[in-house]
Amino acid sequence: MNVKTVLILLVLALATIFALVCVLLTRGRAPSTCQHQALEQEDTDDGQSLVFADLSPEEMVTVVRYLQGNLGVQLVDASRAKPSDNCIASLDVQIPAKAEVLRFLDGEGARPHREALAVLYFGNQPDPNITEYVVGPLPTPTYHQDVTVQKYGGKVPYHRRPALAVEYKQIAGFLKSQVFPTAPSFMHQVIEYDGANLAAMTAAPRGFQSGDRITWFALFQNVSGFFLHPVGLEVLVDHSSLDTSQWAVSRVFYNGQYFSDMVHLESAYMQGHISVEKVKRAPQDGDFSSMKPRAPPAAPFPVQYEPQGPRYSVRNNHILFQAWSFAFGMSVSTGLRLFDIRHKGERVAYEISVQEAMSVYGSNCPGGMSTRYMDGSFGIGRYTSPLVRGVDCPYLATYLDVHYLAHSQFPRTSKSALCIFEQNLGSPLRRHYSNLQSLYYGGLVNSALVVRSIATVGNYDYVWDFIFYQNGAIEGKVQATGYTSSSFLHGDGLRYGNRVWEHTLGTIHTHSINYKVDLDVGGVKNSLVAHDMVFEMTRAPWSPEQQIERPRLTKKVLDTEDQAAFQLQSKMPRYIYFAANSKNKWGHQRGYRIQITSFAGDHIPEASSLERAISWARYQLAVTRRKEEEPTSTSTYNQNDPWTPTVAFADFINNETITNEDLVAWITAGFLHIPHSEDIPNTVTVGNSVGFLLRPYNYYDLDPSIYSHDGVFFTSDQDFTVCEVNPIACLSKTASCLPNFPMFTYDGFQN
């Protein structure tokens, strides 16, 4: 055996030993390392954040049982309720008043009673209505209080109720059993209807005036990605009666023509009076709309992991990450929300929450042209979907279940519907390379904590992120993906979008997202200040005959709500911030700046009869006094009666003073979407991301990220290959072994 062979065998033996050590380290020591990391960030919350916690399944069951036994009326399970029944539509946690919560969090008051908010539909009454009850105290309720009039100034009419899932099932049954059979030849010969191969998409709102419940349903081939397979048939259903036997068809549309009902359509078809555009029957996988990859698997994509376990901790509904701490929750209607957000132990925001996601569509088909979806009415939290490990979030993220009760009297669980992870963004948060005078390098990796949920509301999937950076900045971001909505291509359809398949028109639409940001900068009382720039002309002091144009800082305190309401396409100061009553070391008011990322389409004209219901979308930013009676910018009841809105955001803005007050910023971000061929089969997130940043502005005396443990600095005189000088040099040792990757599971098809 020669020396070369011995060396090869030795290398192989060492490699084997090294691999075994990696496995042992991963399997045996990684958990203890993770525990060590958690101990380094010991959570001192002591359960205070539970004041914001979502209802547990056990609490939901208890509240349902209490309501069934204490309202004196029969409650039918909402999953099988008729419109003429009484039922529990949804439950959510009732967040106590802010002043009460702050007294508790700051050690100056008792823990507030834990309560639930119950939304009930009373259809079996002389005066059918929607009633909201606060039920408490949990876990053993003894009282319920009707808060409907207190919240909305009056009773909520029954016609405003969001449609339950069972109502859509009842409409589908009505179409199948009573409507389609009245046009047998047309349905068989043109649509090739077999009783199961059509899917329907609802339009909304439902009519033209208060009290209407008349809905267009567009029909599609019932295949994978059916949203892209319109057949040209749409039916207007009047389902306003609480007696389902009284439901009727008010109008029928097919390929550019309108008919009084299906009988009229059948007659016109048999007489050859309609233009038939027969759609080729699609295979079950949808063909072009299928999301099945068109290429075989290849080398695995890059995977991110934490060499020594997570550097954040999650305890109940409380998260701790470096200098950040906050509570999180999931509203059944509006989705992801955060409370008591602190940096370096100091509260910078009381609440950051999603308020609404709205889409306004254009089309030359009736369903498309009348659609203004307000997704909160359908339930952004309710439709939060289970996440796929490694695609929706990093494989090794922390995954949490979400519990909700809506459209049923039993709690439901969306498994792994919330993920939390630290993400290396692959770029420096800050850096400088000096080759002048002294020679050195200093930098900090941009590693941030992400809290994410994804809501699939019909055709669209919204990726909701809240991101926490090491420099004290917070980002709220939404990315849109999923299937674009479509109409049947006919006539002048290309005025309203692009043709994306043979009979498919990708219809133009806007997306508008509204957030509530309750900043408390250096305390509850803040003012709103705008900084910007102008060019001023001056003579050069050293050469008076020469002119210099120089930027100059402009400053303005915005004193009233009217001054702080910036219309969607108007010019807004580029630096606008909540200012504290305290100053930093350099004499500046401490502040947090609001920076919006948006390329929104135009807002619906204010002359529209339904505009007040979505008047929050008039403004890219509006800052108002915080009021307990103005907790949200809209209402779930606005969708089905936008003509008499239950909540009209425009009424919040009434020129009250906002100097040294508790303030709320209402932020709208959005984008215009003109679907195109690359939206097939799915819209991609790239370029379809909007949101806002909250950035410290003179809040600190210097950038707080300078205290990060991730900083790197070395000079030309140092040995930058030594771990003590440069921790990056140690990665070959500290990150040399892969952790155990848990087995892939997915529970998204359980419900």
Image (cartoon, helix red, strand yellow):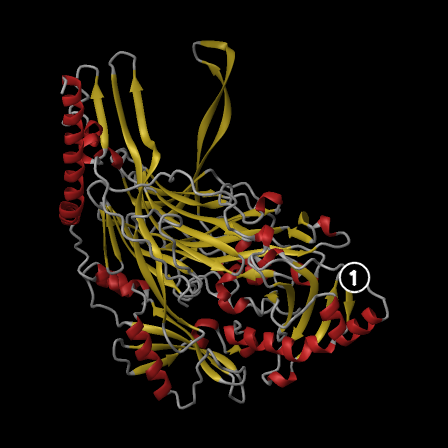
Judge whether 585 appears above or below 110 on screen: above
| Left or right position of 485 against 547 | right
Q: Nearer the viewer, residue 337 or 740?
A: 740
The amino acid type of the residue labelled 1 equals Val
Give the class, few, some or many, for how many residues have Cα within 10 Å of label 1's Cα (few <14, many ≥20): few
- Counting from the top left corner in percent of width and height, residue 689 is at 48, 45
| Left or right position of 125 against 470 | right
The residue shown at (37%, 40%) is: 300
| Quadrant of the image occupied by residue 274 | bottom right
Judge whether 647 appears above or below 513 on screen: below
> Which residue is identified by label 1?
276
Judge whether 726 appears above or below 418 on screen: above
The residue shown at (18%, 42%) is: 23
- Counting from the top left corner in percent of width and height, residue 447 is at 30, 38
SS of the residue under disc 1: loop
Quadrant containing the C terminus is bottom left
Judge whether 429 appears above or below 156 on screen: above
Quadrant containing the N terminus is top left
Kindly give the residue lying farthest to the front in the view shown: 1
* Residue 114 makes an appearance in the image: yes
